Amino acid sequence: MKASNGVRELLAARRTGHSLDAQFYTSQEIFDLDMEAIFGRHWIYVGVEPDIPEPGDYFTVKLGRASVVVLRNDDMELRAFHNVCRHRGAQLCNAHKGSVGNLVCPYHQWTYDLSGKLIYAEHMGEDFDPSGRGLKRVHVESVAGLIFVCLAENPPEDFARMRETMARYIGPHQLADCKIAVQDEIVEAGNWKLVMENNRECYHCVSNHPELTISLYEYGFGYQPSPSNIEQVQAFRDLTEREHARWEAAGLKSAEIDELDSCVTGFRTKRLPLDKAGESQTMDAKVACQKLLGNFGERNLGGLSFWTQPNSWHHFMSDHIVTFTVLPIGPDQTLVRTKWLVHKDAVEGRDYDPAKLTAVWRATNQQDRELVEMSQRGVADPAYEPGPYSPYTEELVEKFANWYVGRLKAAVE
Amino acid sequence: MKASNGVRELLAARRTGHSLDAQFYTSQEIFDLDMEAIFGRHWIYVGVEPDIPEPGDYFTVKLGRASVVVLRNDDMELRAFHNVCRHRGAQLCNAHKGSVGNLVCPYHQWTYDLSGKLIYAEHMGEDFDPSGRGLKRVHVESVAGLIFVCLAENPPEDFARMRETMARYIGPHQLADCKIAVQDEIVEAGNWKLVMENNRECYHCVSNHPELTISLYEYGFGYQPSPSNIEQVQAFRDLTEREHARWEAAGLKSAEIDELDSCVTGFRTKRLPLDKAGESQTMDAKVACQKLLGNFGERNLGGLSFWTQPNSWHHFMSDHIVTFTVLPIGPDQTLVRTKWLVHKDAVEGRDYDPAKLTAVWRATNQQDRELVEMSQRGVADPAYEPGPYSPYTEELVEKFANWYVGRLKAAVE
Amino acid sequence: MKASNGVRELLAARRTGHSLDAQFYTSQEIFDLDMEAIFGRHWIYVGVEPDIPEPGDYFTVKLGRASVVVLRNDDMELRAFHNVCRHRGAQLCNAHKGSVGNLVCPYHQWTYDLSGKLIYAEHMGEDFDPSGRGLKRVHVESVAGLIFVCLAENPPEDFARMRETMARYIGPHQLADCKIAVQDEIVEAGNWKLVMENNRECYHCVSNHPELTISLYEYGFGYQPSPSNIEQVQAFRDLTEREHARWEAAGLKSAEIDELDSCVTGFRTKRLPLDKAGESQTMDAKVACQKLLGNFGERNLGGLSFWTQPNSWHHFMSDHIVTFTVLPIGPDQTLVRTKWLVHKDAVEGRDYDPAKLTAVWRATNQQDRELVEMSQRGVADPAYEPGPYSPYTEELVEKFANWYVGRLKAAVE
Ligand code: FES
Ligand code: FES
Ligand code: FES
Ligand SMILES: [Fe+3]
Ligand SMILES: [Fe+3]
Ligand SMILES: [Fe+3]
């Protein structure tokens, strides 16, 4: 992959334990490289199976300049294609979501079946050979209902490890039997890596997230022990141990697995106890949906978190799931898409109230948006220089930065 | 003319019979080259004589970064100038249209007469020589009332052929005796060449233009003959032959002339029969204006079409004229300006209803805008690759692409 | 400082007595150079002491991509810092103005005292050394209440000359005892140098500023003498001489000092008589505020003007002060911030009416905005070429251009 000497020098000069150089957050060249080397070669989380429950259902997603259509075929399998007609190149599916029998180009009606094969093209003459004119395939996989695509010809093979591990963790929450209750999209005026770094620490939570910290124990996200907090830190450790034992006994995988910077397909998971009522990430820490997920009989299952490199995080509770995808738009613009899922048989108004379901994360997203935007303003300032990460509360930020720099280095070498 | 090796390679690699490479639709470098080599060196359609009927009337038009003021002088001649003051460079005419005695700069009142001569400049001292400080001239010509300008010092000489040919075709419609009943401007989020290619085929008409295809025979725009349509295709050919004979007998030139890719000043014309009532491109195919153009006594004169490279098309009926100009704004933004003209003595409300006059092309323009925009989205996608043109319905698209590539090659050589 | 050969050639080719080449107004490269060489190395006017009267008061200002926070510390001294947190680089102060005890980063609460020292940073571990992690200082100085900052490590030393000279001129108006009655911000679609050039001449005043020319004698800004105006020009000279004598006798410095292109810290000042009532730059030339500034007992003190390179101008009258700062945003976008100050004890509604106070310059600013914008449109036109300055009315424009070109040359050599 082509990269200027400037970029190579920046990569070589990266100082571990410190935030990245400004250009990683501001330069168009590095953004283009990110799109090619990171979003173009890794497994990217784009949506959930309940987005497309029926045959012919599709959604489209933008990965940099590429548009991908993800669909379910008549055999209920997932398929993904580049969303570009093979005639004169019109974008094929121009809606975010829909349902089709075949994929028909709106321009001159070239028609592709759900395997991508070109099955109709008028006026093209006797000599026209439709084979080799099918839609271009994109790799697509499901992790217990979470849909990932990979634009590379040869996707990273260690995806299987994440898929199998997470199937065991997520499985009991039965994502495929959920429906999307609410979906939000916000565009943040910041580089996608600032959005990710923000997600990878809770150093900022106590002062910035009054709603989130109702149910979230701050000790769960790294804490410098000191004489004044040593008791609480220990108490949280004991609680976690007790709860893990209880959940594992009930068949719920809970122990931390962290492959954030040790795998190409980096990820991390852990089931964490919640504070107060302990049931869900809501304003009163109680379930937001009376109809529980899967076969759960109990409400107090903590929050199973799942983080992936480069672009997602997810929280699974007993009653609902919140799932986030980060989609870069430009060096200083990023789309964050949040979906709240409940059991597909839950009835709005009876079992759940969308306002209550979304209250915590809607507020938190806006707070994080402001933090990301003030970070973008700061790193774009010529006075910015990389500063030190906390060894206690920013370990996962460092892992993100390490993974990112490592993957970029691998791509440009 | 300077062009990078990348552009030269793209030009050399162009595969005939196929849509252009993505960069032709997306790169700023090629857009700048288009403005210099295509819009800076060819005859560009910018408006009609009825835009400026009286002495001192002017209009301004933007060709890339250049603004041009086109005016009628006191001898009723057309003149065109670069719209830039020779003092400190302020834009001289800051409105789209107006009427003046002299051209007075709003900044410090330097004053130019309608021949562009600087006739007043205060405070400049005894030594100041106003000669050589006149406005810079731009070539301007009228084709039977259609105004073309050329920014080049030495404009293509074959303009005369187009002017003389088209004077015979357009003449009877007496454009100079028309008035602009309605003018629309839409900005399309697509490269100007996608706007032009869209105009050069009706492969997309049947599925996308329900209003336009009321009066337009689809067979008039290229059709692959097949056992199932051979009769209709032949019937249309017979009809055209009959109508051409009738119109020519009445003094109306009708036969096709196609110099789209055989001349520097490329153009094409043909008078085509209309369907249904056969009178006009309206929702009922009947005239939209009761007062006919010129000396016409008959309503059923078909539609005389006139297409030019690189940026216009026009339809002349017995009752009204529709004329389109394409003005590039940026690699992915284009202005399309449409004017509907009727006889200058026609009275709104009595002879014509502006809503009925514009119904077909207003709808069609919006439909084409959507097609152009989905094309732009598609060709900007890294998955796009040039696809094959239909040998039946996209012949004129191919001629546009050939002309364009040829002219660009000639400019950079 | 790095500059391309193209820029060096443009600088070398500059023709004195003529407006600048187009690229100086349109190119991103030159804009970046302007921010580095001009706004990054010279004394820039950013606000007034009454913006931050109390300890802990601060305001922020954007100089290109750099944000600077200017504050008053507990010892009532001015201090300025780069507005970037030394942790992960978030922008520290995200409001335009405010009041603080310490500077606390909103992200993770790193806390700096008003000398910029890092005094608190949680979770950073035992080994963390806060020294060397303080905010980066920016030079800041007051000129009789006008605040200037300089981003350079070694600011131009001739600032002292301007400060001492102007202290004598401005002193009696006692700016520190004023309050900001009204503040306006307008964004002009033009290069900052067009904004400055516009400010440096009144060639355009008669035709464009009906409100301003109520009180402003046009003869005060350069005029070509001619048989028809020789009497008025002489009358204005005599008036100025008489008034200067009267004002100097009353202890008010009035004589012209012009160091616009003879100093690195270029400036010019002069007290000019006003027309009509002669008191103030208002719609009736009478004072807009009944409470006079300083210890003034008389209203007719003319207008003391103060112009600086590269970005400000100011008018001091007996009753109020108007002060302007020009802040470049991009090659074709500039912020102009205007403040109207009156005595701090003046009471709105009793002593002054904000609408009357601002009427002249609000109108004038909008007129100048239009002139700047039509200039930007013109110089961006490929047909633009530098034109001649008037030797009578554009002398100060020439001095601005000379100063600018000289300073840029010095920086890139
Ligand atoms: S572009 Fe899709 S059918 Fe023509
Ligand atoms: S710029 Fe036109 S008169 Fe000065
Ligand atoms: S960025 Fe300021 S405290 Fe973290
Ligand atoms: Fe957060
Ligand atoms: Fe069309
Ligand atoms: Fe002005």
Image: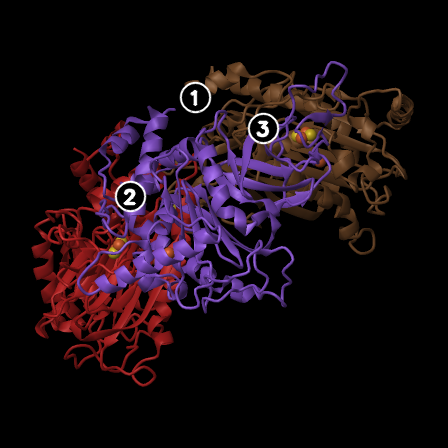
Chain colours: A purple, B brown, C red
Expressed as whole percent of the image width and height from the top left, the position of residue B305 reads 75, 30
Distance between mark 2 and mark 1 Cα atoms? 45 Å
Residue drawn 45% across the image and 69% down it? A284
Type of residue at label 1? Answer: Ala
Q: Is residue C368 above or below residue B45?
A: below
Distance between mark 1 and mark 3 Cα atoms? 35 Å
Q: Residues within 10 Å of mark 2 (few under 14, many from 20)?
A: many
Q: In this view, does C69 lie above or below B88?
A: below
Return the disc, 3 or 2, that comes first in the chain's sequence. Answer: 3
**Residue at the disc numbered 2:** A398
Q: Nearer the viewer, residue A348 or B18?
A: A348
Judge from the rendering whether residue B382 lies leftward or rightward of residue C206; answer left or right: right
**Residue at the disc numbered 1:** B3
Judge from the rendering whether residue B266 lies leftward or rightward of residue A271; answer left or right: right
Q: Nearer the viewer, mark 1 or mark 3?
A: 3
User: Chain ID for label 2?
Assistant: A
Q: Is mark 2 on a helix, strand or loop?
A: helix
Type of residue at label 3? Answer: Arg
Expressed as whole percent of the image width and height from the top left, the position of residue C397 reads 26, 48
- Quadrant of the frame with the C terminus of chain A: top left
Expressed as whole percent of the image width and height from the top left, the position of residue A140 reads 55, 34
Q: Is mark 1 on a helix, strand or loop?
A: loop
Judge from the rendering whether residue B248 lies leftward or rightward of residue C75; answer left or right: right
Are dots 2 and 1 on a single chain? no
Q: Is residue A393 above or below residue A280?
A: above
Type of residue at label 2? Answer: Glu
**Residue at the disc numbered 3:** A137
Number of numbered callouts drawn: 3
